[in-house]
Amino acid sequence: MMNRIHKMKVLIVGSNPSNASPDCSGFHIATKSRVVVERWLKDIECQIEYTNVATYKTENNRPLTAKQIKENLPRLQEEIDGYDKIVALGNTASKALTLLRADFMAMPHPSGCCRFWNDKEAGERKIEELKTYIGG
C-alpha cells in the first residue's frame, strides 16, 4: 500500500473584497493583502485558498455591519467545511468565524492601515505563530 502525503488545506478568511480588486474574488492576486499573506506563508508546504465573509465590495472599503456579517454566515459555513486550518484576517473575519463556532487562528489584517504591524518584532512573532499553527 502506498502512503499518501496529505497536503494541509488552509483557508484564509477576510472581510470582503478590496475596492482595489479587479473582481470580487477573495484576496485577488493583484491586492497587497494577498501579496503579504503569500510572503508570510512562502516556506510552508500547504494548499492555500482564500475567501471572504462577504462576496461584495463596500463603499470606501468600510467594515461590514453586524447585519451584513450575519447575512453571510450560511454561505461562509459551507465554504469553511473541509479545511484543516482556518485563518481569520482582521476583526470582521474573526467575528464571523466565532459566530460559526469554527476553530481558527486570528491574525491582524495584513493591511498597511493596521497599526499592529508598526511593531516589527510583534509582527514577526505573530507570523511565526501562524506558521506553527499551520504546521510549518
Image (cartoon, rainbow, N blue to C red):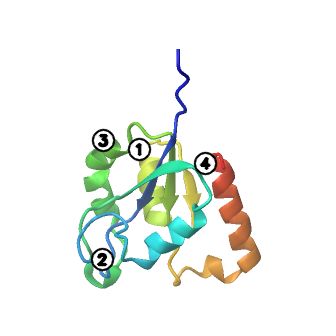
Residue 83 falls in image quadrant: top left
Can you tell which mark lies on residue 21?
2
Secondary structure state at the residue bearing disc 2 = loop
Q: Is residue 109 visible?
A: no
Secondary structure state at the residue bearing disc 4 = helix
Left or right: residue 24 versus residue 31 is: left
Do labels 1 and 3 touch, CB within 8 Å?
no
Do labels 2 and 1 touch, CB within 8 Å?
no
Please state which amino acid type lies under the numbered disc 3.
Glu
**Residue lying at the far right of the rendered structure:** 121
For the residues marked 2 and 4, what is the alpha-carbon distance in whole angstroms? 27 Å
Upstream in the sequence, badge 2 or badge 3? 2
For the residues marked 1 and 3, what is the alpha-carbon distance in whole angstroms? 11 Å
Q: Residue at x 30, y 77 (%)?
A: 21
Please state which amino acid type lies under the numbered disc 1.
Leu
Per the image, the residue denoted by label 1 is 100
Q: Residue at x 69, y 50 (%)?
A: 132
For the residues marked 4 and 3, what is the alpha-carbon distance in whole angstroms? 21 Å
Secondary structure state at the residue bearing disc 3 = helix
Closest to the observer, 36 or 100 = 36
Upstream in the sequence, badge 1 or badge 4? 1
For the residues marked 2 and 3, what is the alpha-carbon distance in whole angstroms? 24 Å
Can you tell which mark lies on residue 78?
3
